[in-house]
Image (cartoon, grey):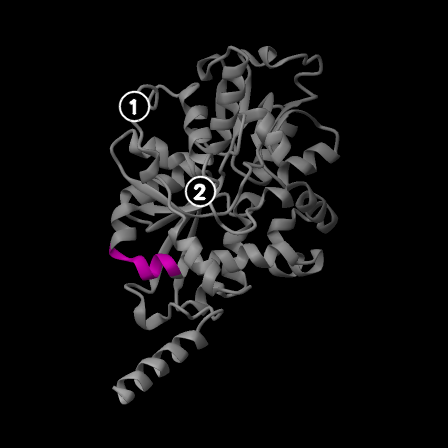
């Protein structure tokens, strides 16, 4: 009995020594070390935690070999996961609801953003006399990609004003220089996009902001409650088959979120790729201040968030209206709670 107790105690001490270590769920326990992640607009602040986890080697610290594929918008990243070319999506939470409406079960397991950060603005060039959302009828609205979170946000704002997506033309313009060029050239009349794109256009005086979700207060004004945004989600099949790998991904993302809470502007600039800065470091840091509050501080999904997301979709999306969506199957905080108990920044 004494020897057994000693061995048990030794095991407990060995386990305790791993607390706070990024390798608490080490490579030896991973069901698979190679994970393909799809993202739509990786340069946007919406997905910044993913870039931080990648660039600061938090995924590698967990024994993961992560391959990130960047698409023009979240709807295309989603298609990659549904089609099997990606294991995990870094994308908008509402896509898990849209998928369930089609009897495809995907679940969020770590939240990146607690506010969408999406800004809807009109072009001062093509709409100098803009007065209300109603003026957008018949106009062209640029979004990252049709069906992405940018078009979902714009559709909801239109719905609140009595318009539908059929009253406008959504044009996919991407999430970077292409979006800026589309607005500057007059190809679109309005733009639903994210920072740093929107801050760049705002600072140059080319747009007029008509709806903003970069802060918690603005988000509550637009959506009426907590609106979950970017997250990591995967099929329930992947999560069930790879719980340790899913935990390792969560650990890395939670570390990234914690790092962002205390990172200086210089540390941030030195971590992200140069291309993210759009040739203007001051602009990037200014944009960061606009959206910093929107980042999840811990990766936890707010309990009322999924219901807000569903209510938003039901306001305009026919594929979700009247469908029995089981919200409990679209998210979990289990992996994040475990990460918060074991992982330090």
Estimate the x, y position of residue 91 in percent, counting from the top left.
44, 42
Residue 243 inside the magenta-drawn segment: yes
Question: Along the horizontal axis of the image, is 9 left or right of 187?
Answer: left
Residue 115 occupies which quadrant of the picture? top right
277 or 315, which is in the foreground? 315
Between the residue at mark 1 and the residue at mark 2, the CA separation in whole angstroms equals: 22 Å
What is the number of callouts on the image?
2
* Left or right of 75 in this view: 133: right
User: What percent of the width, then of the height, locates residue 239?
Assistant: 30, 52
Q: At 65% across and 58% down in the image, what residue appears? A: 262
Q: Which residues are magenta?
A: 241-247
Name the residue tied to disc 2: 91
Q: Provide residue 54's location: percent of width, then percent of height.
A: 49, 60
Asked if the residues shown at circle 1 and circle 2 are in contact, with their CB atoms under 8 angstroms apart, the answer is no
User: Which residue occupies 34% across, 47% down?
Assistant: 234
Q: Secondary structure at mark 2?
A: strand
Image quadrant containing the N terminus: bottom left
Residue 182 seen in the figure: no
Q: Position of residue 14 (x, y in %)?
A: 39, 79
Q: Residues within 10 Å of mark 2 (few under 14, many from 20)?
A: many
Which badge, 1 or 2, comes first in the chain's sequence?
A: 2
Q: Residue at x 74, y 49 (%)?
A: 282
Residue depth check, mark 1 versus mark 2: number of the one nearer the observer: 1
Q: Is residue 123 left or right of residue 108?
A: right
Q: Residues within 10 Å of mark 1 (few under 14, many from 20)?
A: few
* Image quadrant occupied by the C terminus: bottom right
**Residue at mark 1:** 323
């Amino acid at each position: 009995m004494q020897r057994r107790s000693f061995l048990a105690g030794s095991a407990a001490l060995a386990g305790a020594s791993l607390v706070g270590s990024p390798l608490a769920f080490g490579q030896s326990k991973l069901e698979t070390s190679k994970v393909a992640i799809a993202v739509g607009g990786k340069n946007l602040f919406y997905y910044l935690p993913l870039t931080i986890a990648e660039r600061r080697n938090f995924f590698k610290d967990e024994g993961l070999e992560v391959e990130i594929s960047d698409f023009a918008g979240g709807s295309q990243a989603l298609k990659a996961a549904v089609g099997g070319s990606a294991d995990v999506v870094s994308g908008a939470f509402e896509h898990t609801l849209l998928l369930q409406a089609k009897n495809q079960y995907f679940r969020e397991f770590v939240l990146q953003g607690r506010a969408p950060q999406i800004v809807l603005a009109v072009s001062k060039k093509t709409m100098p006399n803009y007065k209300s959302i109603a003026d957008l009828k018949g106009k062209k609205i640029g979004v990252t990609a049709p069906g992405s979170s940018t078009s979902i946000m714009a559709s909801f704002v239109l719905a609140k004003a009595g318009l539908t997506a059929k009253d406008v033309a959504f044009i996919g313009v991407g999430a970077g220089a292409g979006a800026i060029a589309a607005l500057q050239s007059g190809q679109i009349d309005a733009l639903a996009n994210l920072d740093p794109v929107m801050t760049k256009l705002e600072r140059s005086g080319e747009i007029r902001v008509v709806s903003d979700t970069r802060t918690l207060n603005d988000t509550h004004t637009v959506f009426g409650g907590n609106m979950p945004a970017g997250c990591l989600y995967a099929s329930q099949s992947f999560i069930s088959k790879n719980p340790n790998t899913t935990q390792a991904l969560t650990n890395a993302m939670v570390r990234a979120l914690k790092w962002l809470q205390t990172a200086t502007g210089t540390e941030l600039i030195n971590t992200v790729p140069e291309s993210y800065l759009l040739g203007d470091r001051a602009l990037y840091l200014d944009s960061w201040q606009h959206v910093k509050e929107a980042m999840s501080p811990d990766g936890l999904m707010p309990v009322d968030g999924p219901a807000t997301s569903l209510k938003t979709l039901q306001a305009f999306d026919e594929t979700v209206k009247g469908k029995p969506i089981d919200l409990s199957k679209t998210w979990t905080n289990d992996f994040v709670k475990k990460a918060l108990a074991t992982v330090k920044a």
